[in-house]
Image: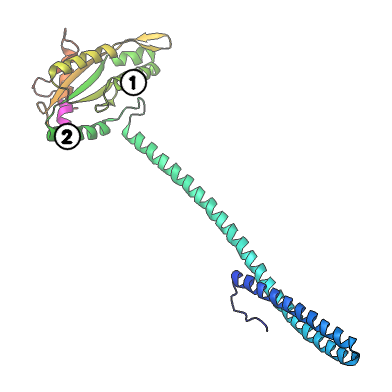
Amino acid sequence: MKRKTTSAPTLAAALEDNKDVKIRVEGAASDLASASAVLETEIAGGDAELAAREALKVSKEVENKVQECADDLHSVNATLAQGVAALEHTEDALSAAREALIDAELALTAAKAGERKALLAARHDSATGLPNREHFNSRLTHDIAVAARQGFELAVMFFDLDKFKNINDTHGHAAGDEVLKQIAARLLEYCRVEDTVCRTGGDEFLYVLINPKGRTNIERIASALLETLALPVVFEGLQIVVRPSIGISLYPLHGKTASELISTADAAMYVAKKSSGNPGWAFYDGAPIPHAA
């Protein structure tokens, strides 16, 4: 009996059909063996003509069965070949998809790295690696909000390097850039994790101290920073010494916003720079602000 075909045979169905054909072929062989045994008995009994007629009949039936199985097997093999080809095509498609996924992941990684790099560049000074003024303002605004909630003090220090222009004019801009980098490195090394330091532009730096615990401690920190920053900067065999001036403002005494605190610290820095015999730093004294930061 021929198998029923479908319009879209599956590989699994073809494999099942292949088993069915095998069973039928084995059955035909068994029938042929049984018929042969019967014929041998009849021939042994002397009825050769009857045996010949029956042998011919059995042979024809077996031949028809085998031919039917052969036709079905051909169809099954064709289906199997199509299934294998489809599997190979599927494997190729999966392989291409995996490669595309890998490429997409690499592109995503590169895009994220580019985004981080762009964000870093947007928020940091390219010459020193310190946060820039915009980033500092954002951090200071956040620090003010926290200080207002928790009731502690902030100190903003405004640094200016005295006669920095002379370094560029005398030794060149490469020397000036090296001075800025080493000053930035010293500030970073000194500041605590919770504090923030930035380069606001030119030879000016800002430093916010979180909860400095009183003026005496702020003065101690300012004196230590002056001492650290006044150490010689070594550049191509030269020893370049810079002297910073530091203006200091306090939250909430001298301002309640980032711009107010920076402006009052800037005004105090000018007082420190212009006063002779001062320790190199000055607190804002409440006078009108002569220079807007």
Is most of the magenta stretch helix, strand or loop? Answer: helix
x%, y% of residue 167? 34, 13
Q: Is residue 261 magenta?
A: yes
The range drawn in magenta is 257-263
Compared with 235, 67 (above or below) is below
Label number found at residue 185: 1
Q: Is residue 176 magenta?
A: no
Q: Which residue bears the numbered disc 2? A: 146
The number of numbered discs placed on residues in the rendered structure image is: 2
Quadrant of the image for the C terminus?
A: top left
Tell me what residue is drawn at x 43 percent, y 43 percent.
111
Quadrant of the image for the N terminus?
A: bottom right
Compared with 68, 142 (above or below) is above
**Amino acid residing under circle 1:** Ala
Q: Is residue 126 left or right of residue 63?
A: left
Q: Earlier in the sequence, mark 1 or mark 2?
A: 2
User: Residue lying farthest top?
Assistant: 277
Kind of element beneath mark 2: helix
x%, y% of residue 97? 53, 55
Kind of element beneath mark 1: helix
Mark 1 or mark 2, whichever is nearer to me? 2
Examine the image and state in which quarter residue 66 appears.
bottom right
Other-residue count near label 1 (Cα within 10 Å), few / some / many at <14 / 14–19 / ≥20:
some
